[in-house]
Image (cartoon, rainbow, N blue to C red):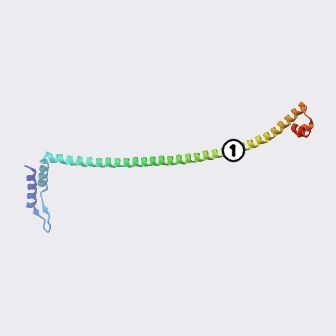
Amino acid sequence: MDIGARLQQIEELVRAAQRVPLSSSVLVNQQEFLEILEAAQNELPEEIKQARWVVKDREELLSKARRDGEGLVTQAQEEAARLVSREEVVRSAEEEAERVLGEAREQARQMRLEAEDYVDAKLAQFEIAIERTMGELQKAIGQVRRGRDKLRGGTVAEEEFGPGELGEQK
């Protein structure tokens, strides 16, 4: 007998059952009802039993896929957060490097200007010292020349007036 016939037997059993007064319930022979159900279960086609397993496996697979998908989404969010954080660190480091480099350039410029000012002041002092020394050297050269002239036998008048001036007065 097939499953359809067993279901027909259950229906006939319920329709033929004695009614409970003042109720929509009926009295059914429990033993007979259970035997028909057991026979129906045993006669279920193998495909229906396999379909139940397939449905159960499908639900387990979907559940696992959901969990795996949620895990992947979580991993992707964590990785994205890590990359954003890393990018933020790199951007921050680049900004700090630019700031430090700018400060270093400004300090180098200031040091160069200060060095130029220092060298310029020292050269000005050196120039003044050389001019003073040159003036003193010219005086010394003049004294050396007068001393040499005296040694050659020149007179005091020639020394004071020069050799050409005395000759013109004579």
The part of the image, by quadrant, that contains residue 146 is top right
4 and 27: which one is in front?
4
The spot of residue 70 in percent (x, y) is 33, 49
Residue at left offset 34%, top offset 47%: 72
Residue lying at 81% horizontally and 38% vertically, measured from the top left: 138
In percent of width and height, residue 67 lies at: 32, 48
Relative placement, left or right, of 117 versus 132 is left
Residue occupying the far bottom of the picture: 22
Q: Nearer the viewer, residue 48 or 20?
A: 48
Q: Is residue 99 left or right of residue 130?
A: left
Left or right of 113 in this view: 15: left
Specify few, some or many for label 1: CA neighbours under 10 Å numbering under 14, 14-19, or 20 or more: few
**Residue occupying the point 19% across, 48% down:** 52
Which residue is label 1 attached to? 120
Snapshot quadrant of residue 126: top right
Q: Position of residue 170 (x, y in %)?
A: 92, 38
